[in-house]
Amino acid sequence: MSAQRTSKASGTDWDRLRDMPDEEIVADDVPYDPNDPEAVAAFWSGAQVSAPAVSKRASEGASDLAETDTEETVLVTLRLSPQVIRHFRATGREWQTKIDEALKEWIRGR
């Protein structure tokens, strides 16, 4: 694990935690053990998939892309599967732009 520096001290005794055996670490705020496939399945079994909210303009047939095509891009953090990243990186330069284009194409096809 790499040490990350932030502007705020976390208050965590990292040396004590690093030396602590795994079985002594208590994480009461974690909903399940991510290393236990049954616990993961049970946690997500009640999940409901929902579509994103559609703007009034979009529901009236106006394209959400029409006015944003000329806007600058917005920096976001986005979690994508390793397969998606490998695929787009393999396409060469501007692979992030290609992801943006693929998402726009998906929006148009809805």
Image: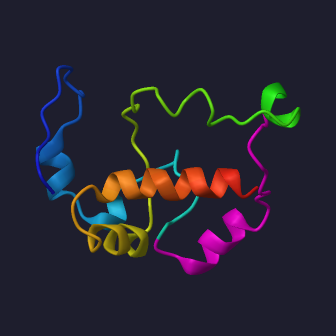
Task: Give percent across and percent down for residue 56.
Answer: 84, 26
Could you say which is closer to the camera, residue 79 or residue 61? 61
Q: x, y percentage for residue 106? A: 63, 58
User: Which SS does the magenta portion mostly show?
Assistant: loop
Which one is in front, 77 or 104?
104
Rendered residue at 76%/55% (across/down): 110
Left or right: residue 20 versus residue 61 is left
Q: Is residue 4 above or below residue 70?
A: below
Q: Residue furthest bottom?
A: 37
**Depth check, front residue: 30 or 44:** 44
Up-down relation of residue 67 to residue 77 (above or below): above
- Read off the magenta span: 35-54
- Please name the residue shown 39% across and 58% down the image: 98
Which quadrant of the rendered structure holds the N terminus?
A: bottom left
Instruction: Give left or right: position of 73 versus 92.
Output: right
Q: Can the viewer see residue 87 in this picture? A: yes
Write down the quadrant of residue 24 in the picture: bottom left
Which percent across, then down, holds residue 22? 30, 65
- Residues 54 and 72: in front is 72
